[in-house]
Amino acid sequence: MTITVVICAFTLKRWTDLVSAVQSCANQSVKPEEVIIVVDHNDELLIKATREIPDVKVVPNAAAQGLSGARNTGIAASSGDVVVFLDDDAYGEFDWLVHLTGPFADPKVAGVGGWIVPIWPGEAPTWFPETFLWVLGCSYQGLPEDNGTIRNPIGANMAIRRRVFDSVGGFTAGVGRTGRNQLGGEEADLCIRYSSRFPDDRFVLSRTSVVHHRVTASRLTWWYFLRRCWAEGLSKAAVSSLVGSDSALAAERRHLVRTLPLEALGTIRAMKSNPKAASVRLGLMFMGSASAVAGMFWGRARPRQSPMRTAAGDPHADINEGESGTHRSGARSFVTIVQFDVENGTELTAPGVMAGERLWVEVVKGGRVVGVVDQTAEADDLLPTSVVKLIDQYDDFECPVSVVIPDQSLPRATVVVPTMNRRTDELTRAVQTLLDQDYPDFEIVVVDNRPDDHGRPITEFVGIPQVRVVTERRPGISEARNRGVADSSGDIVAFTDDDVVVDPKWLRAMGERYVLDETVEAVSGLVLPLELATAPQLWFEEFYGGFSRSFRPQVMKLGAPIDDGLFPYAPGSFGVGCNMSFRRSTLQRLGGFNPVLGTGTPAKGGEDLAMFSSLIFANGTIAFEPSAVVHHEHRRTESDFLAQVFDYGTGLTAMYTSLILHDPRHLIGMIRRVPAGLRLLTRPRAQRSPSRAPSYPRRAIVLQALGMVYGPLAYARSAARSSSR
């Protein structure tokens, strides 16, 4: 086992401390193979350290400024099997590294935290609560015994196996400290991400691995104490947005319930001997706890804007690219998607998973996806017991017999792709997968729905005969789709979005349904996640159960036996806008999509469900074809996910409002289905999701309800804007 020590430094004010930290590494009973100093965007310090500190590697922080970026740079520059982190204002005792790395004899130990003792500027303050020594970056009362399991080590003294970074990436940018920004929690985020994928591994505490951490006089003030508690609350809010509040706050809940009351009781008993110090200590315990809780609630009230990934945009975030944890788009995932064929007992994808990694298993039978299961990997494969369970679980799943339709019998198709062209690479990717369709006769109509292209028209598809770009300046996806229909020449018109990857047989699966059943006027298909690279992308699958409600072919029409208490008003039961098609004659007969509804209007959405509902109430027939597959790139950030939840709620009741205004008799049908709707909204989290332990924030349910309340008003605003054009 080789050891690298990484020391991150950012200021010349700690020069003497930095030299002491490096010297303590050289004085170890067992010396590390290399010591790396990472200088965080300070050229003067970089030059001085390079010139005056021998036998170490000095590198500049090549990532974003801050502790996370500096640590990621150190990891990228290191070669050790174990990476040890030591603060620049701390030094290790003679046998510090021996005790810190000793627990790695157990292969299940992924990381070790050592004991951190404060170096006070004078006498140890009697008024400072021992349970709050974490404020100063030191070990505190209430931590486990030696070799006990911990959620995460404290950053001033910790050792992490390289495989942790190989499997889940580095420290998350925006969580670690940056200059005056005192947010921490990057160690907790890293360890929780790893533990969620490898639950059999653990992080442990070594009380015999001791470093001494300098405490400056400026930190021994009430203001600093309360400010750090507030920042800790903000940090926990940030980490819980990354990994879920259950994981992020488990240790804090135990600390609040068990350890703090014990010190408070001891402090009360000490009132007689030192009433002033005891009173201050008791008061700080109360105010510090209140400040941390307030900071957490404030932080959770402000959705984070950055992707819930490791150091988004940071070139050193994914320390070693490797193959572990890959997903469909090629980058490391929060959860890895694999496909498993239960008939052959083999994986159809080989992403190079690692033992204990969390997998999102798409179960395949008869050449199609028939279910999704949350599983854990063993070595580079599924757990053997999981394989047996999957085979048994899907043994009686009956797949339809495939009927081969000759090419000449398939109708001509038009695929309409509305776009705001916010990301040209996504649009290009989507169109390329459409061009690769196994279908004899089709065209692609890209509808540029930007109100103003700022002089930059869409020219990426010039020279491709199958692709036409048309412009619709009136805002809203309904207007864009209607323009696409008007410019179409196909007998069937299929719709998808610019943030999808389309299966090569998508269009053929739809076209065959129209040929096999001439009564079918619309076909929708299965929507699977393209990636689960961030926590919010997983939350979408957990909260909605994904876009698709079923993996079996269905035919939906009035009077058909359908096991759905909300039919025909059920959201998502017919299909979704990124994977649907209609006969062109049907769209013309129904008058097209309602321009008052949909993305890009105040009503936010609901235009696809409104079209399906209009067809159903016109005694039409809709087919759901699960072999018509698109892979959708879910929204990657917490703020985008929460906005999407609100918008979906708004679009749903805006659509209901449009139905009622068109025909008030719909109100009676909706009232009859209120009990079923309430059961759907209030069902437990575990019933919403294939996940073993759903992690999406509970406030998503509240935001969905608020969106539903706002929906009728949003419809009124959208209708007024539409009539004024």
Image: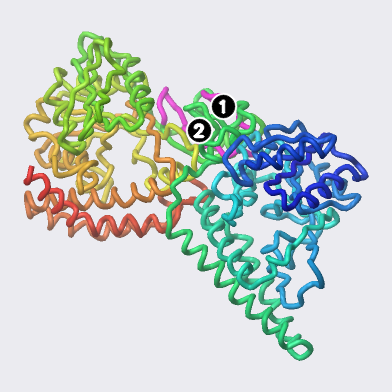
- Residue 48 position, x and y percent, is 75, 40
Foreground: 97 or 556? 97
Residue 364 part of the magenta segment:
yes
**Marks 1 and 2: in contact by CB < 8 Å?**
yes
Could you say whether the residue bearing mark 1 is in a helix, strand or loop? loop
- Residue 555 position, x and y percent, is 23, 34
Q: Where the N terminus falls, by quadrant?
A: top right
Foreground: 610 or 510? 610
- Single out the residue that lies furthest toward the bottom: 272
Q: Where the C terminus falls, by quadrant?
A: top left
Q: Which residues are magenta?
A: 345-369
The circle drawn on residue 337 is: 2
Q: The residue under label 2 is which amino acid type?
A: Ile
Residue 485 located left or right of residue 53:
left
Q: Would you name the residue on which mark 1 appears?
A: 351
Can residue 112 be seen here? The reply is no
- Residue 682 position, x and y percent, is 36, 59
Counting the numbered discs, the total is 2
